Amino acid sequence: MDPTPKTSPDEVVTLVVKHLIKPGHETHYEAWLRRIVRIAGERPGHLGVDVVRSKQNHLALFTCVLRYRSTDALERWLDSPERNELIAEAAPMLADGDNTEIGAVNEFWFNPETAAKPPRWKQAVVTLFVILPLTLLVPIIWGPVLRLHPFLSNYVVATFLVTLTIVLLVVYLLMPAATRLFAPWLEASVKETL
């Protein structure tokens, strides 16, 4: 089974790269990182990169989130001889190797492990903007159908149908669209310019 997620033509795919740096190599790694970010940025399908600096076990941890237009564009970069040479060059500086993870850009909502996720309050605001109109409109739309039969007008059944409709709309349609629409605002707080 292929672990790489399949994306629709309009869905952005992300590559999360985590590098834990050996003590004393931070300056050399930063220079290397600027170089690989510039080179990756010139590749077809590349949409941008964010770098988050943090600490893990008293070591510098760099988490890079690269966005690509498609899975194919991302795979071409991952498999390129150029990237392989650059990773080989960085290997002596890395305490834990080259750790990569591929995912859809909107997976932050369900994936707490993504290092560059937006703050929870921003996730809450976007979620509120998506769910509030649905909680007002979906019961009104379901209303005539729920009154057709006593079974459907049962409180538990009616609540289940309304909730199911809202959840399906949020997960499959509206939240992916909202995360694309609000992406610049969501990413603004995790972006750190090189």
Image: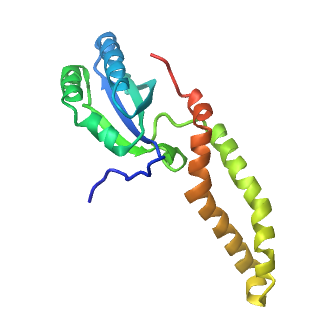
Residue 69, by quadrant, is top left
Residue 141, by quadrant, is bottom right
Q: Residue furthest bottom?
A: 150
Q: Is residue 114 left or right of residue 152?
A: left
At x 30%, y 53%, the residue is 3
Location of residue 140 in the rendering, given as x and y in whole percent from the top left corner: 81, 68
Location of residue 118 in the rendering, given as x and y in whole percent from the top left corner: 57, 36
At x 64%, y 69%, the residue is 164
At x 22%, y 37%, the residue is 79
Location of residue 27 in the rendering, given as x and y in whole percent from the top left corner: 33, 10
Q: Along the line of sight, which residue is nearer the eye, 132 or 19?
A: 132
Quadrant in which the C terminus appears: top left
Quadrant in which the N terminus appears: bottom left
Location of residue 139 in the rendering, given as x and y in whole percent from the top left corner: 78, 69
Q: Is residue 21 left or right of residue 113?
A: left
Residue 89 position (above or below residue 111): above
Residue 154 seen in render:
no
Q: Is residue 100 left or right of residue 137?
A: left
Residue 141 position (above or below residue 157): above
Residue 60 seen in render:
yes
Residue 134 position (above or below residue 118): below
